[in-house]
Image: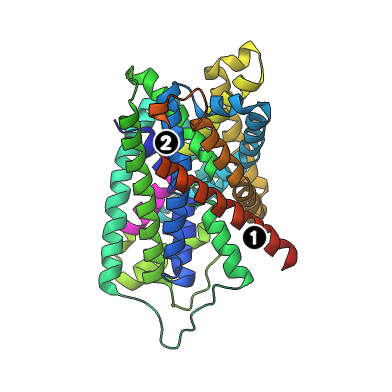
Amino acid sequence: MLGPGLLFAGAAIGVSHLVQSTRAGADFGFALIWLVLLTNFLKYPFFEYSHRYTAATGESLLNGYKRMGSWAIISFTILSLVSSFITISAIALVTTGLTENLFGTGLSIIQLCTILLVLIVAILVIGKYRLLENMMKVMIVILSITTVVALAAAVQHGSNVKPGFVHPDLLTTVGIGFMLALMGWMPAPIEVSVWPSLWTLEREKNTRHTASLKESLTDFYIGYISASALAVVFLSLGALVMYGTGETFSNSGTVFASQLVHLYTQSLGKWSFLFISVAALITMFSTLITVLDAYPRVLSGCASLIFDHPFFQKMGYAYWLWVTLFTIGTLLIITFFTSSMKNLVDIATILAFLTAPLFAWLNLRTVTGKNIPTEFQPPSWLKGISYVGFVYLLGFGVYYLYVRVMW
């Protein structure tokens, strides 16, 4: 039964958790735990609709966008194209840094990154979707165990707040900006909701089993609740281990992750190095392998719906072309634009945040369309949460623009 939902969890539990959630705890203690829980709750209908739509129609959410009009699928394609190279490169850079931190290979960043990308491509070539799904099940279990052990040790150790520490104010330009960025990628950008629908169709090809709505939603809830719970765990780790230490934390994801491992080892002892390092590395590696599979599927699917050409209709050819382009593009970006990575990630984050209301609305429209049987449409209470979530995303998007312009 389990598959696409866990792959979603693997994709979501990445930068948003290891860096953003941990940093929320490191910079503000437990003050933002309400924001993490609220954002996960109000976003969840829009991710659930991906599973619901595919179970009802047997087609991906991309087809639902196409039914809304060419403008919808083209808008989604442009956003995915802009964010894909930046997102994969940023995740690859953090993953490479953590790998070096754990194993001490002595290789350069570009050499080690090349090895990781080649390894992932080999996994996708040899095992395809089936191996990816099975690997993710193992990685999620290991990640859950290591993070829970790390959190238990942190709770037993207690807070590291130094006497005289001044608690930071959230209602500043920096604090508000961080909250908006945290919401944008918590647990993942809304456009990621398309990915499980594509994985569901691929899983049907492999297993020759069409999942029922109940099976699809069970898979979704296990993956989504896991991602949400681990966001709280990483925030708690940051609050217990890093908050109030007086350390200045880097804006670089790679450096920040290394600081996390160092402070954890310093506070709890060398025994904890393995647990937090493995948890951090699996967090990022699971994200890297899922995004390197998902973006080619997404853009291949988009191209097949936009262009009426035999090449684009053969998903296999287009998929491997995109895998190759992303692998080469990631290495080039890391080689020549590492110093600009923060600005590039900011662009991707801002785009994802500002377009979230649009894709939230599209997801709601697709799952309540005329082609969806009544028994598959969301119940009234779920629609109610969707409306509140839409206003929440739209309101903070407008507020973000106000802050950028007026402040």
Structure colour scheme: rainbow
Residue with the mark numbered 1:
399
Residue 90: x %, y % from top left? 56, 48
**Three-letter code, disc 1:** Tyr
Disc 2 packing (10 Å; few <14; some 14–19; many ≥20): some
Identify the residue shown where x is 66% and y is 40%: 82
What mark, if any, has residue 171 been given in the picture?
none
The reply, left or right, for residue 181 in relation to residue 144 is right
Q: Residue furthest right?
A: 405
Q: Is residue 43 above or below residue 26?
A: above
**Left or right, 2 with reference to 337:** left
Residue placed at 46% from the left, 61% from the top? 35
Q: Which mark is residue 378?
A: 2
Q: Name the spot of residue 283 as percent of width and height, x first.
A: 40, 49
Question: Taking 287 as reference, is 294 above or below it?
Answer: above
The answer, for residue 107, to whether it is visible in the render is no
Q: Which residues are magenta?
A: 275-285
| Real-space Cα separation, disc 1 to disc 2, in angstroms | 29 Å
Crowding near the residue tagged with mark 1, few <14, some 14–19, many ≥20 C-alpha atoms within 10 Å: some
Going from N to C along the chain, the mark reached first, 1 or 2, is: 2
- Secondary structure of the residue carrying tag 2 is loop
Question: Of the residues tagged 1 and 2, which is closer to the observer?
Answer: 2
Q: Main secondary structure of the magenta part?
A: helix
Residue 336 horizontal/vertical position (percent): 67, 47
